[in-house]
Image (tube, rainbow, N blue to C red):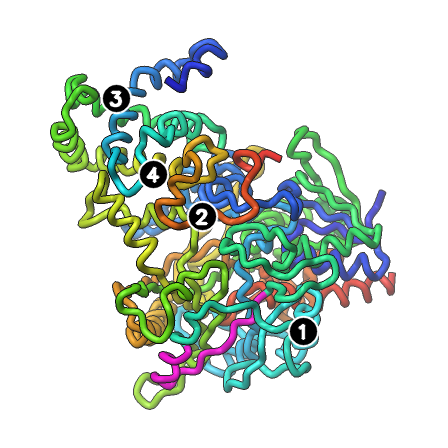
Amino acid sequence: MKYDVVIVGSGASGGAVAYTLCKAGYKVAVLEKGRLIKREEFSKDELAYARRDIVTPSLFDEYHTIEEKVDGKWMATPTYESGWSFWNGNIVGGSSNLMSGMFHRMHPDDFRLKSKYGEIEGANVVDWPISYSDLEPYYTLAEELVGISGKYEKHPFEPPRSTPDFPQPPTKENAVVKLLDKSCKALDIVPLVTPRAVLSQDKGYRNACYYSNFCGSYGCSSGAKGSSREALLKPALATGNLTLMSNSYVKYLHTGKKDKVEYAVVVDTITGKEKKIFGKMFVVAAQAHESARLLLNSANRYHPDGLANSSGELGKNLIFSAGGSGQGELHEESLKEIKFEALMETGLFVNRSILDWYFIDHWWDGKFKGGSVEFMFEHQNIISRAHKNNEEDGRLVWGKALGEKLVKRFTQSKSIRFEIFNDWLPNDDCFVSLDETHKDKYGMPVGKLRLEAHPQDLKVGKYIAKKCEKIFEEMGAQNIYSSISSSPPQNLVAGGCRFGNDPKTSVLNKYCQSHDVPNLFVADASFMPTGGSVPYTWTIYANAFRISDYIVEQLQQG
Amino acid sequence: MGLIPYIEAKELSAFDNVFQKIEPTIEAVQKHMFPDGSKLPSALSMNVTQFLFETITHKSYDKDIRAFVLEGAEELIKREKGRFVSMTDREKEKALRAYEETNYGSNWLSRIMTLTMEGIFSDPVYGSNTKEAGWKALHAYGGLPRPKTRYIEL
């Protein structure tokens, strides 16, 4: 059997490519390392989903090594020692099952950051080979297919759109938005309704959100969340053209001839048996750091430095989302504007974001690229909230004092949070390569990640955090703090296979097709030379739909 | 106590052997941290020692931490010359706070606290949080649907 298209990975981008190709009548195989968990099998089991490696590999089996500078030398530590997992949901549908679904389009100027803001010393900023107008129709398509709810409001930094509004109204909101909106307005800040990949109304076989109070980190039990599995793989399977192979780990891609991938070498993770999966086209969609690793692990005599790596750029310029978060407590006795009972109502979203500081051009602060802000309640996980409140002055609180403290914390206050998303500037010390000694349980070299951030990222994050803290002060929150760090969020990763017009300086062309190997595409966030200042997922969906149309054209031409 | 079915079910492995020795110590620490008469349900009523044993022996649990749980208890036994379990509450408090002064002891106590909270506040399917008493105390309830099996074993 030779498939028209073989896709490695079933997350957001793999799902979008599978959907488009299957609908166009092509035979597609999706290879997913993890298992299938169906909608009706998901639960809100905190211990399993949030505290153990159950939907991600055990770090003793599969891991990364992380390079940090110690006394001027790069030292690599395996993640099974540090416990810092870089896996993000290895199940059918990938981490899109577990996302919070706060979605934003990138701004038109994010596609031309270098032209707009010029060079930044120590950062490898380049313009994209496509513009916002190339991607806009696909952002719109993703709104419809994935199901994004929201409410369009005009704002100087809200990207233009080709349709008047979102296909569905926003999800229901907690009363806290009254207080938040009022506080923002008092500070001349414009709060916007967050577009969310969560259905507020039924959509075909998917049911509206049921406000479970446990959305992010968990699979969705109504089908409301726009995961790849729910929104794209299900309809792709219904065409009869999709062969979905779960528990299938891809070791490497085999290129017999110099310019052609012939098959993927796949291990059945249950039986350990190896097999070859043949295809006309290969689409890598394993999440940025793993896609680069797979191509590096696919080196052979024709491609000694890794597949699609004639530029030497493969794995380079890995990016994350910079920024951080902050929190404040709203207490019963000092709550303004809204009733405490309404604040304590569970499950409803905060659904607010701020784009006011996306680009900063201020007489005193200067002109620079800023970022976006999302608001949400503190994650409602019970064990983790209890755990966060069991210390005082560096000592554990236990006994009756612990009972007093936890009951007070849980029943007389609720914490609200902000998360800042700003550009992680691509730089020479943030990349993925192959570890020379460490191998995973399948015998393949693990990815070695060097994760340095550019100092500008911290500066921008802190600038925005200060403004957000003011909002919380205005709201009357207590114990306000923020934490802006250069430590990367492992679930917001992109880059490593830059796209560009010049084969000497980029891995992929503007269709995310390898410059070197024409039947090889990378569909996930790897292509992004810069990341914008919003969560990636909408852009990943949109771009994958865009390149799918090109793959269809290529197949039509034979 | 609750370990007996495990002990009878199979030959005692080295791990079970060690755990049997340190079990009274771990239980005493858990009871001290979650005593009767608190606003939270007590360790005694929540079956937390059995939970801890089943949790650290599950394949999803980090094997290095599993070993640490045992070693830290052995260390506490040694520090207090075998007397910890028979101490008064006041003596236990003193002993544990002294243990907490060491980095090692502080990490271990924190681990026991975490493992106990994981029991009291996780879904009752895991054998603790009896009748959701942990959730009731905090007015915070796990989301729906609830797990039908432990650790997503479908």
Residue A440 inside the magenta-drawn segment:
no
In the image, what residue type sits under mark 4?
Thr
**Which span of residues is magenta-colored?**
A181-196
Chain ID at mark 4:
B
Q: Nearer the viewer, mark 2 or mark 4?
A: 2
**Residue with the mark numbered 3:** B74
Q: Secondary structure at mark 4?
A: helix
Image coordinates of residue A75 in percent, x first then y, are: 36, 45
Q: Secondary structure at mark 3?
A: helix
Chain ID at mark 2:
B
Q: For residue B114, which numbered disc appears in the image?
A: 4
Q: Is residue A228 left or right of residue B65?
A: right
In the image, what residue type sits under mark 1?
Pro
Label 1 near label 2: C-beta < 8 Å? no
Image coordinates of residue A325 in percent, x first then y, are: 37, 63
**Viewer-closest of A141 and A294:** A141
**Residue with the mark numbered 2:** B141
**Viewer-closest of A554 and A419:** A419
A536 vs B146: above or below: below
A322 vs A353: above or below: above
**Residue with the mark numbered 1:** A167
Estimate the spatial distance between the alpha carbons at disc 1 and disc 4, rounded to whole Å. 44 Å
Q: For residue A66, which numbered disc appears in the image?
A: none
Q: Nearer the viewer, mark 2 or mark 1?
A: 2
Q: Quadrant of the N terminus of chain B?
A: top left
Q: Residues within 10 Å of mark 2 (few under 14, many from 20)?
A: some
**Viewer-closest of A179 and A553:** A179
Image coordinates of residue A249 in percent, x first then y, are: 65, 40
In the image, what residue type sits under mark 3?
Glu
Q: Residue at x 25, y 21 (%)?
A: B74
Callout 3 and callout 2 share a chain? yes
